[in-house]
């Protein structure tokens, strides 16, 4: 007897729940819609199984593509970066030359060849403009009371080698 009572309770609960669903779906009536208006239930896309993942080949292909992109960027960017450093050093050397030439207009006569410290002290240069792009001190050479040349050691850091960057009014390099 207990199982019959509990079974009827469950059936009653199911019917009530079904009527609520029908009311929400089709409005106030609990009657089923005509067969022509019935739609098949919407299917959800199948859930992806957690066992599915990326294969080793897929991972290797992605790593190979990333490596190709990194290699191309390195191959194309590094030479341009070096040329940009050289161009910036040429501009700096010319600026120091012009500052040294201007030094003679503000310095007392017979002061000799200006040093980088003299140019900084007279506010013709900033302190960070006394070294080239590679951290080497610039050299100023004078002929009498005229600035002859300003030279940077270049990328190798050795004065007198072929990668030096120099500027003079006579012979611009």
Image (cartoon, rainbow, N blue to C red):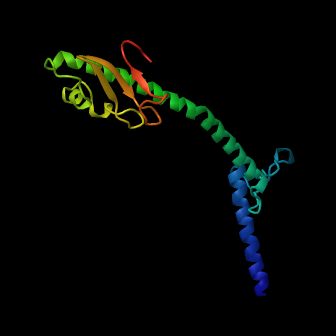
- In the picture as drawn, the residue positioned furthest to the bottom comes out as 1
Answer whether residue 31 is visible to the viewer in this image. no
Of the pair 31 and 133, the residue shown nearer to us: 133
Residue 105: x and y, percent? 19, 15
- In the picture as drawn, the residue positioned furthest to the right comes out as 35
57 sits left or right of 146 in the view:
right
29 sits left or right of 96 in the view:
right
Task: Give the residue drawn at x 82%, y 50%.
Answer: 40
Answer whether residue 122 is visible to the viewer in this image. yes
- In the picture as drawn, the residue positioned furthest to the left comes out as 108
Of the pair 132 and 54, the residue shown nearer to us: 132
Q: Which quadrant of the figure has residue 171?
A: top left
Of the pair 89 and 30, the residue shown nearer to us: 89
Task: Give the residue drawn at x 31%, y 32%.
Answer: 130
166 sits left or right of 19 in the view:
left
Q: Quadrant of the N terminus?
A: bottom right
Q: Quadrant of the C terminus?
A: top left
Residue 150: x and y, percent? 35, 23
Residue 24: x and y, percent? 68, 53
Task: Give the residue drawn at x 47%, y 27%.
Answer: 86
Q: Which quadrant of the figure has residue 104?
A: top left
Residue 13: x and y, percent? 71, 70
Of the pair 156 and 34, the residue shown nearer to us: 156
């Amino acid at each position: 007897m207990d199982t019959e009572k509990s079974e009827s309770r469950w059936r009653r609960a199911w019917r009530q729940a079904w009527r609520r669903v029908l009311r929400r779906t089709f409005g106030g009536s609990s009657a089923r819609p005509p067969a022509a208006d019935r739609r098949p239930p919407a299917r959800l896309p199948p859930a992806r199984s957690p066992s599915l993942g990326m294969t080793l080949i897929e991972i290797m292909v992605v790593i190979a593509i990333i490596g190709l992109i990194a290699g191309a960027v390195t191959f194309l960017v590094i030479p341009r970066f070096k040329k940009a450093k050289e161009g910036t050093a040429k501009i700096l050397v010319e600026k120091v030359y012009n500052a040294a030439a201007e030094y003679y207009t503000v310095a007392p006569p017979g002061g000799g060849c200006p040093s980088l410290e003299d140019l900084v002290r007279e506010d013709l240069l900033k302190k960070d403009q006394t070294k080239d792009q590679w951290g080497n001190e610039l050299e100023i050479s004078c002929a009498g009371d005229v600035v002859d040349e300003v030279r940077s050691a270049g990328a190798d850091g050795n004065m007198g080698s072929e990668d030096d960057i120099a500027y003079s009014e006579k012979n611009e390099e």
